[in-house]
Amino acid sequence: MLLSSVRSAVEQLLLPAECLLCHALLNPRDADRLVCPVCRHRWKPVRAPWCARCGQPEPHFGPCRLCAAWPSALRSARSAVWLTDGAQHAVHALKYNGLARIADDLALAMGSLRPHTAGPSVLIPIPLAPRRLRQRGYNQSERLARALARMWRIPVIVDLLIRTRETPTQTALTPGTRLANVAGAFEMRNTELGMRNGTQGVNSAFRIPHSTMILVDDVFTTGATLAEAARALEQAGATTIHAITFARANIPDFT
Ligand SMILES: [Zn+2]
Ligand SMILES: [Zn+2]
């Protein structure tokens, strides 16, 4: 996109070569980074023990409430770091300050999240609704997916999933309300990409029916958005879906 490359050139002219988070001068070999290695290492990794499926830290009492209603094709969700301090600042820069380049820094922290799969895999960013995309000028999840694709040398598929509507900010909702809130927010694109809506299993219209699909998003809150996107893929015949995000927000306590 012309606009985004102009934006990127302007950014590089205007921004001094210092870390966005701590303002330390960047080492020349990190000159194309926005976050210094020290700040990147301060991001707090999400660590086991966790629910094997949704990656939410235990303890759980009984079955995991968070992922019980997920579509069965969605096998796992993992996040690199907690959405605190510097990581939160970095996500904010990616989403609201027009700093699309910071996706490369965030993707570095996601290096270990690649699902272990035998066959081919593809990255699928969570799409934005068209109006939000026009406002922001880019899809932050697509930027993350493209950075991961360069690291892992696997393809990114955009325009496969489409978002029919933007959902309101979800932070104040309970997990159950969030699922209802995003229900039907995604659809599959027809024909051009060899897809059909509403086909199941053996009638899959995917060109590579056994590919592992890796959904990419910036932040995991309850996983409702990822689950809904996975549901659309599953209805079109996908059988193995994993989800990865840069950060994981703490879930408000509703008990
Ligand atoms: Zn720094
Ligand atoms: Zn779970």
Image (cartoon, rainbow, N blue to C red):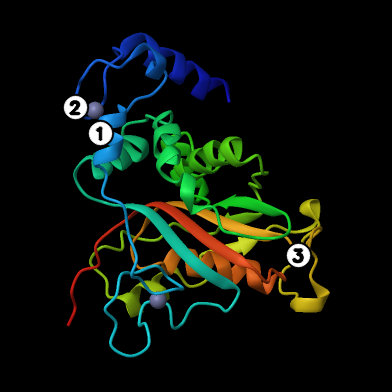
| Residue 141 x/y as whole percent | 48, 45
Q: Secondary structure at mark 1?
A: helix
Q: For ligand 2, give the image quadrant.
A: bottom left
Q: Residue drawn at (26%, 23%), measured in percent from left and top?
A: 19
The answer to the question of whether label 3 and label 1 lie on touching residues, with beta carbons closer than 8 A, is no
Q: Amino acid at mark 2?
A: Cys
Where residue 10 appears, as percent x and y from the top left, is 40, 13
Image quarter hosting the C terminus: bottom left
Are the residues tagged 2 and 1 within 8 Å (C-beta)? yes
Q: Is residue 148 above or below residue 113?
A: above
Q: Position of residue 105 (x, y in %)?
A: 40, 33
Point out residue 107 in the picture as x, y percentages from the top left corner. Answer: 45, 40
Q: Is residue 195 left or right of residue 98?
A: right
Which element is circle 3 on?
A: loop
Circles 2 and 3: CB distance less than 8 Å? Answer: no
Q: Which residue is mark 3?
A: 210
Residue that mark 2 sits on: 22
Q: Which mark identifies residue 39?
A: 1
**Structural distance between the alpha carbons of marks 2 and 3:** 44 Å
Q: Is residue 231 left or right of residue 192?
A: left
What residue appears at the point 69 percent right and 57 percent down from the top-left corner? 189
Is the C-beta of the residue carrying label 1 under 8 Å from the nearest atom of ligand 1?
yes
Q: Is mark 2 within 8 Å of ligand 1?
A: yes
Q: Tag 2's secondary structure? A: loop
Q: Amino acid at mark 3?
A: His
Circle nearer the N terminus (2, 1): 2
Classify mark 3 as within 8 Å of ligand 2 or not, answering yes or no: no
Q: Amino acid at mark 1?
A: Cys
Report the Cα–Cα distance between label 2 and label 1. Answer: 7 Å
Identity of the residue drawn at 42% across and 77% down: 67
Disc 3 or 1, which lies upstream in sequence? Answer: 1
Q: Which residue is at the far top?
A: 13
